[in-house]
Image: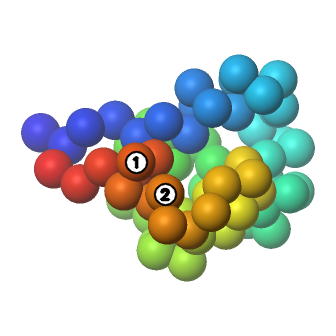
Amino acid sequence: MAKCNLVKKIREKRMMSKAELARRSGVSLNTIIRMERNLPCRIESKRKILLGLGYDISRKDEIFPEG
């Protein structure tokens, strides 16, 4: 079973709404919802969300752990 990503936890800690993160990331609100539910998302969407949260791409494995 895959570990849950930390997008929701980080977003809430930064007091951002899902809509604000979507706007900052340049992705749809539905993409944020899917990502927070740990559903499959494109790598490009993950990259955009990392940047929207203010993280460097090098931290991707920390935010989106595999397996």
Disc 1 residue type (three-letter): Glu
The residue identified by callout 1 is: 62
Indicate left or right for 24 with 67 as reference.
Answer: right
Q: CA distance from mark 2 to mark 1?
A: 5 Å
Indicate left or right for 43 with 26 as reference.
Answer: left
- The answer to whether mark 2 and mark 1 are in CB contact below 8 A is yes
Residue lying at 71% horizontally and 22% vertically, measured from the top left: 13
From this viewpoint, is residue 29 visible?
Answer: no
Residue lying at 15% horizontally and 50% vertically, measured from the top left: 67
From this viewpoint, is residue 44 visible?
Answer: yes
Residue lying at 12% horizontally and 39% vertically, measured from the top left: 1
Q: Residue furthest bottom?
A: 44
Disc 2 residue type (three-letter): Arg
How many numbered discs, if any? 2
Q: Quadrant of residue 20?
A: top right
Q: Secondary structure at mark 2?
A: helix
